[in-house]
Image: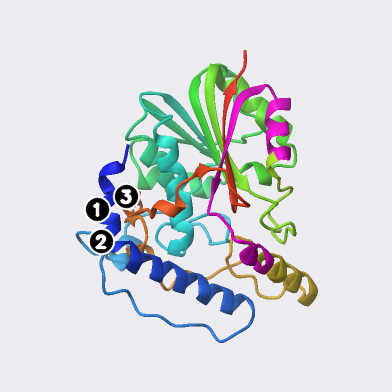
Amino acid sequence: MFGSTNDLRAQSGDARRQSYEFCFASRIASNLGLPRLSFAKPALQFHSQENDLSTLLQQNLPPRPALTGERIDPLQSPAFYLQQHAARYIFAADYCQGKLVLDAGCGMGYGSEFLGRYAHSVVGIDLDAATVEHCRHTYSAPQFQCADAERLPRDWDNRFDTVVAFEAIEHFADADAFLQAVRRVLKPGGRFLVSTPNKAANPINCNEFHVREYRKHEFERLLAGCGFGEIEVHGQCSNPDWRVGLNIAVSLARKTVGRLHRGTLGIGGKIEASSHPAVAGPFAGETIDPFLVLPEFMPRKLEGRPSFLIAVATRVS
């Protein structure tokens, strides 16, 4: 679908990759209490027109929801995490062509807006009212509602062709209730795309916002037990053994030292705005640009121990 982007990626991939790796290294240093690395804006620009961040932030919008490490903000979150999140929505676009789509746990709404370019219509829901209000003021096309994904409205039964829920299921106290609600609002034969951190890549959960994390077999069993079939599990962001070891070491250090400063690395807590904002990521303002996502961030055949699992499942009648 996006094969025409290869030339652009080849031209700019190395410079962008260095930028993300440097950003990631800086965050690790900060989390471990080491002197924070400083870095300049990369010379290579990835948009035809550079984002004016100050102008975007001064628009007449509701206050932006606070950064917590769980809700990605395309104007403030580190580019590494913007890559991860944007890649999931780009992956989902093929399953949304001409469909009625529900984005469950839409967050800041940029993914719902992106899917709306391909879908017949998109409804984005989030439990946080302030976030939904921000979405409504930022985007005109998707319909945003404040709703509990574990208790979806009954008048939505058999309504949607596709439901996406990225980085949401690990937050639910009753994952079965969430999956049953998703199955209920899907049409028979409808597709469900759901992602979650892979517990095999970091067995020690230090995220105060995550109720439960899953390994591949646990994830598949959970989906099958709630009436989903034809389950395909993809991986995202593969981890060599040394990185899995690093993940475990960092998590153990946090548990041992105590709950002091919590940075990003996808582990919640209060974080500061990135000093390397969206200009180096896959966003133009608050809109996903599929041309700017590095190929290695795209979900692919499951190999090794990826950081994230992305399942595509079908509602079985």
Q: Is residue 87 visible?
A: yes
What span is colored magenta in the figure?
217-246
Q: CA distance from mark 1 to mark 2?
A: 6 Å
Question: Is 113 situated left or right of 48 in this image?
Answer: right
On screen, residue 18 above or below 119:
below
Residue furthest to the right in view is 256
Q: How many marks?
A: 3
Circle 1 SS class: helix
Q: Quadrant of residue 2?
A: top left
Amino acid type at mark 2 = Gln
Please name whichever residue, 302 or 212, is drawn nearer the observer in this view of the structure. 302
Q: Which residue lies at the image location 33% right of the left edge and 61% below the top edge?
A: 13
| Color scheme of the displayed model | rainbow
Image quarter where the C terminus lies is: top right
Q: Position of residue 186 (x, y in %)?
A: 55, 21
For label 2, the residue is 11
Task: Pinpoint residue 128: horizontal percent, then vertical percent.
Answer: 57, 46
Q: Nearer the viewer, residue 153 or 308?
A: 308
Lower position in the chain sequence, tag 2 or tag 3: 2
Q: Is residue 215 above or below residue 237?
A: above
| Residue depth check, mark 3 versus mark 1: number of the one nearer the observer | 1
The residue at which mark 3 appears reads as 289
Observer able to see residue 127: no
Q: Is residue 32 magenta?
A: no
69 left or right, relative to 94: right
2 and 3 marks in contact (CB < 8 Å): no
Q: Is residue 243 above or below residue 71?
A: below
Q: Nearer the viewer, residue 196 or 14?
A: 14
Q: Earlier in the sequence, mark 3 or mark 1?
A: 1
Q: Disc 1 marks which residue?
A: 7
SS at mark 2?
A: helix
Residue shown at 34% from the left, 32% from the top: 118
